[in-house]
Image (spheres, helix red, strand yellow):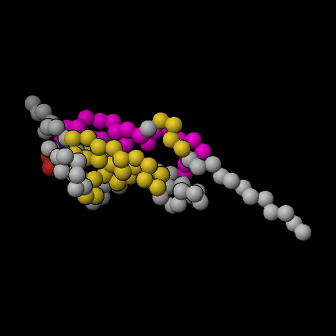
Amino acid sequence: MIAATAVVLAVPASSAPPSISGSAVAGQVLTELHGTWSNGPTAFTYQWEHCESTGSQCLAIAGAGGQTYSLGAGDVGSTIRVVDGLAARHPRLGARRKCALLSLKVVRHALTG
């Protein structure tokens, strides 16, 4: 008889929270910083969303699935958020796991002149 050995993989865990860098001003670029992870995450996924000014009723922004998002004039007065998902091939996480939801309110148009 052969004895079976179980291998338990450690679940990736965040040791520093994700954040958004950049100015909440039309014409500026926002960048999602995924924080610090342990136990070998292999990839991250992103989806930027446009929300009402209160941060509710959010809809995915078409084509905004990268780590950065360029704010436009239509974003002023709205809340922009990013869903930061960890895509790790880990049996206890599944293929995609929402790990953070970050938001900020776009406060004004870019200054010119």
The reply to whether residue 66 is visible in this rendering is no
Extreme residue in the bottom direction? 1
| Image height of 46 relative to 109, above or below | below
Residue in the image at 11% along x and 33% along y: 112
Q: Is residue 44 left or right of residue 20?
A: right
Extreme residue in the right direction? 1
Quarter placement of the C terminus: top left
| Image height of 2 relative to 64, above or below | below
| Image height of 61 relative to 2, above or below | above
Q: Is residue 83 left or right of residue 25?
A: right
Extreme residue in the top direction? 113
Q: Is residue 37 magenta?
A: yes
Extreme residue in the left direction? 113
The x and y percentages for residue 84 are: 40, 49
Residue in the image at 47% along x and 58% along y: 96
> Residue 6: which quarter of the image?
bottom right
Residue situated in front as seen by the camera: 35 or 72: 35
Q: Which residues are magenta?
A: 18-42
Residue in the image at 57% along x and 57% along y: 92
Q: Is residue 60 magenta?
A: no
The x and y percentages for residue 90 are: 58, 57
The reply to whether residue 105 is visible in this rendering is yes
Q: How many marks?
A: 0
Quarter placement of the N terminus: bottom right
The x and y percentages for residue 15 are: 51, 37
Residue in the image at 21% along x and 41% along y: 105
Q: Is residue 35 left or right of residue 88?
A: left
The x and y percentages for residue 19 are: 37, 38
